[in-house]
Image (spheres, rainbow, N blue to C red):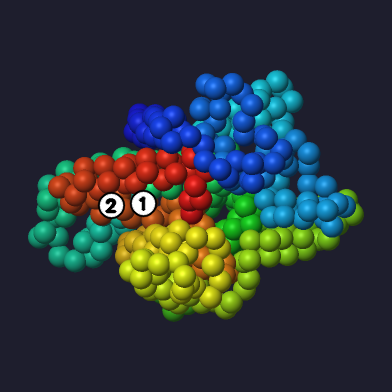
């Protein structure tokens, strides 16, 4: 609790001061009228508007509009269809708290902060549960014990084991895009629910796994991919509830015999189906949440094809910047200023490159279910690119993939000299990005 609380308040102070400071220094920019036509992020007085700057921009407008007006799928022809891309649990929570008298923005921030606190605590617990794997102790014990210290740990490693969970929590809270975790966005709620799914599945609490998974599936469309790690943990483990039913089997064969409790996995697609049924019964189409992505030029290009598209866009971005001109645009489709697009594509590709060693580390150190979850979750943004920016929103997809932070915590625990520079660098990037966000510049 102490580690999680410290990471929470330190990181949120960075977000608050950087966001408010940017709004004071540079104003709110020109995009407010274009992306907040209903005026849901302003009108709170000078102090209220400043405090709203780091938490209520861009997609927050969609959540606030849904919380106030609903989805109105019957009016899809008049522009309400894109709302359905934002799944209902978070705006429902905002509306429920607002009806108690709280301003909608305050309600959204309260949900995000509570969810972030729960997520940080859950990540700490998961790191402790997987500590032997994260520190390599499991493999060390399979070798001769001459390299172990008096406590049975690899020599020189004992002093760092206690730091793994603390550093993983800090890496989550100070990630460059972690300011979204306290904004009027669904990221923090989804993060908390997905961490809870893993914790319950690892401990064999399958009813709670199904309930939390269903809630996650109605928070973000990516929640449905939690079916993958749940099934991997159920069939292959590791599990704390019972011993494997099959020993010495081939690696690809399940180690646990299915029982009736496996049916709880069906709660995840059932929850998405309930949302689709609601839209259909209200006069819209059941497939509206998926067709709505066309409003952002997002389309299916093939599995992980956006990796190539993102690399090509980054290369063209370098050429655009080095050309020092706007007359010739190197992008096939430009979404505004070619220099701005070039900078975004380079930044997005940098986030993709940074994720590669982290994904490899997760696959190497953690149970396969964690790596399977990361690969399945990344398949969504990397298979559905956006024309002007193929990797759009990739950093926000990455910030909720907590196995990456778990691996980073273990990596930093083994390298004491890298801890402070890494965490300070991440915090500075977060301050930069929240400053852009607060002044209505597009981030992620």
191 up-or-down from 112: above or below: below
Callout 2 crowding tier (Cα within 10 Å): few <14, some 14–19, many ≥20: many
> If the image is split into quadrants, where does the N terminus sit?
top left
Task: Please tell me which residue is depicted at 62% across the width and 73% down the height of the picture.
Answer: 300
The reply to whether discs 1 and 2 touch (Cβ–Cβ < 8 Å) is yes
Q: Position of residue 128 (x, y in %)?
A: 35, 45
Left or right side of 159 for 193: right
Query: Pointer 2: what residue?
Result: 410
Query: Pointer 1: what residue?
Result: 406
Task: Please tell me which residue is depicted at 84% across the width and 57% down the height of the picture.
Answer: 77
Left or right side of 258 for 166: left
Callout 1 crowding tier (Cα within 10 Å): few <14, some 14–19, many ≥20: many
| Secondary structure found at label 2 | helix
| Secondary structure found at label 1 | helix
Q: Position of residue 19 (x, y in %)?
A: 44, 35
Q: Position of residue 133 (x, y in %)?
A: 31, 57
Residue with the most extreme left position: 146
Label for residue 251? none
15 up-or-down from 344: above or below: above
Task: Please tell me which residue is depicted at 68% across the width and 61% down the height of the picture.
Answer: 295
Foreground of the two, 143 or 114: 114
Foreground of the two, 223 or 436: 436
63 up-or-down from 320: above or below: above
Q: CA distance from mark 1 to mark 2?
A: 7 Å
Would you identify the image quadrant in which residue 403 lies?
Answer: bottom left
Task: Please tell me which residue is depicted at 32% across the width and 42% down the height of the picture.
Answer: 427
């Amino acid at each position: 609790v102490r580690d999680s609380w410290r990471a929470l308040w330190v990181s949120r102070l960075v977000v608050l001061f950087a966001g408010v400071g940017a709004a004071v220094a540079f104003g709110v920019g020109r995009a407010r009228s274009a992306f907040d036509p209903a005026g849901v992020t302003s009108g709170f007085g000078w102090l209220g508007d400043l405090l709203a700057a780091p938490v209520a921009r861009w997609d927050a407008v969609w959540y606030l509009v849904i919380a106030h007006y609903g989805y109105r799928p019957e009016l899809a022809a008049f522009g309400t269809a894109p709302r359905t891309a934002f799944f209902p649990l978070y705006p429902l929570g905002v509306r429920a708290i607002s009806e108690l008298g709280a301003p909608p923005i305050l309600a959204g921030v309260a949900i995000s902060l509570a969810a972030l606190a729960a997520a940080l605590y859950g990540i700490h617990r998961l790191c402790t549960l997987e500590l032997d794997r994260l520190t390599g102790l499991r493999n060390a014990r399979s070798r001769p014990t001459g390299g172990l210290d008096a406590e049975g740990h690899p020599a020189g490693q004992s002093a760092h084991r206690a730091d793994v969970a603390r550093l993983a929590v800090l890496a989550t809270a100070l990630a460059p895009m972690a300011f979204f975790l306290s904004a009027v966005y669904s990221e923090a709620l989804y993060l908390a629910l997905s961490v809870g799914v893993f914790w319950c599945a690892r401990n064999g609490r399958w009813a709670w796994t199904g309930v939390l998974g269903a809630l996650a599936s109605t928070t973000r469309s990516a929640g449905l991919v939690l079916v993958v790690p749940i099934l991997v943990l159920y069939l292959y483990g590791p599990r704390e509830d019972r011993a494997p039913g099959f020993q010495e089997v081939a690696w690809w064969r399940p180690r646990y015999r299915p029982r009736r409790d496996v049916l709880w996995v069906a709660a995840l697609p059932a929850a998405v189906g309930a949302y689709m049924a609601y839209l259909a019964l209200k006069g819209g189409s059941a497939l509206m949440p998926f067709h709505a992505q066309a409003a952002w030029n997002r389309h299916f290009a093939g599995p992980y094809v956006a990796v190539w598209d993102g690399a090509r866009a980054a290369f063209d971005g370098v050429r655009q910047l080095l050309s020092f001109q706007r007359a010739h645009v190197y992008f096939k489709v430009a979404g505004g200023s070619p220099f701005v697009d070039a900078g975004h594509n380079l930044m997005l590709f940098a986030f993709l490159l940074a994720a590669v060693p982290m994904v490899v580390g997760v696959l190497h150190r953690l149970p396969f279910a964690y790596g399977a979850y990361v690969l399945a979750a990344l398949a969504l943004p990397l298979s559905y690119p956006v024309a002007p920016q193929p990797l759009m929103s990739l950093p926000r997809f990455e910030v909720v993939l907590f196995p990456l932070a778990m691996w980073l915590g273990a990596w930093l625990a083994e390298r004491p000299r890298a801890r402070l520079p890494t965490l300070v660098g991440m915090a500075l990037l977060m301050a930069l990005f929240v400053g852009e966000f607060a002044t209505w510049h597009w981030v992620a």
